[in-house]
Image (spheres, rainbow, N blue to C red):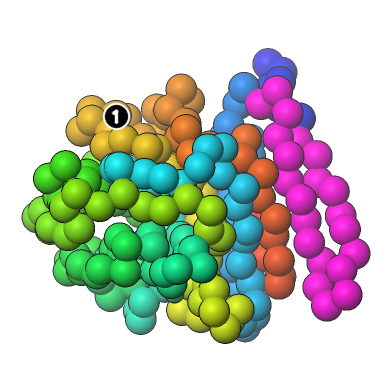
Amino acid sequence: CIAFCTWVILFVSHSLHSIFLLHNFLCRKSSAFPAFYFPAENLASHVTVQPLRDMKLHSFTLCFWVQAQNRDSQTILSYCTQERDNELMVTVGSAVGLWVGGHFVEFPLHHRSEEWLHYCVAWASHSGTAYLWINGAVGKENHLQRGYVSQPGGKLVLGKDRDELLGLFSNGFTGRMSYLNLWSWVLSHSDIRTLALCKHSELKGDVISWGETSMSLSGGVVLVSDLSCR
Ligand SMILES: [Ca+2]
């Protein structure tokens, strides 16, 4: 059985660190794409993402697999514009945090597993409702920023909170991250269950599509085998 999956890593020498540019061509078998490992010791490690469409979002769903320690506040995705620092941000750790347009809500976490976990965080502008699913099970709803639309033209980063004004990175993620996708709508419960059960070959985000969206790895982020669905 041949996987028609060819992805190319372009190694670019940079003044301070190395940047890997990942491009995935003709990939029909997404599971062959590696996971990202963010080492604890490197404060600069992050991934820059070129989204497939603009970030003017009336609603969204962010789903991802992570294997991490349940401590502190670790950034999965951060999006900032010149006008607003935390335009869109999702953190994991002792709780799951969500920022939309600079406003914040928190989902308490009862999972203490440090195994691979599947998360989906969603938000809909028309109701202001925010949802968290863990391993396909939905938790209590939150509410924020009803009627808001996130602003385009900002910078999208995985694994660190980027401060646009100061150009600094903080609240780093430590651990493994895989199959992260971002959609411009709220996924159905059955789609989220499909993702959590690893039957996700057809489910790719329209804003970030894992294995297809261009990403630049900086500051010691390492490519490792994706064991999230083994
Ligand atoms: Ca920030």
Q: Which residue is mark 1?
A: 191
Foreground pick, 67 / 73 = 73
User: Taking 73 as reference, is 81 above or below it?
Assistant: above
Does dot 1 land on a helix, a strand or a loop? helix
Q: In this rendering, is residue 194 above or below 96? A: above
Position of 38 with respect to 191 (left or right) is right
Q: Residue 205 lies in what quarter of the image? A: top left
Q: Residue placed at 88% from the left, 75% from the top?
A: 15
| Image: magenta residue range | 7-27
Overall secondary structure of the magenta section:
strand
Q: Is residue 16 above or below residue 145?
A: below
Q: Residue at x 76, y 50 (%)?
A: 21
Q: Does 22 lie within the magenta span?
A: yes
Q: Residue furthest top?
A: 1
Residue at (37, 37) in percent of width and height: 184
Where residue 199 appears, as percent x and y from the top left, is 40, 27
Does the closest atom of ligand 1 sit within 8 Å of the Cβ of label 1? no
Left or right: 195 as drawn, with respect to 143: right
Q: Residues within 10 Å of mark 1 (few under 14, many from 20)?
A: some
Indicate the quadrant containing the N terminus: top left, top right, bottom left or bottom right: top right
Q: Position of residue 182 (x, y in %)?
A: 43, 43
Give the amino acid type for the residue marked by disc 1 in the picture. Asp
Q: Report if residue 208 is visible in the image.
A: no
Would residue 90 be found to the left or right of residue 14 on screen? left
Percent x, y of residue 150? 36, 52
Q: Quadrant of ligand 1?
A: bottom left
In this view of the protein, which residue sits in the foreground, 134 or 86?
86
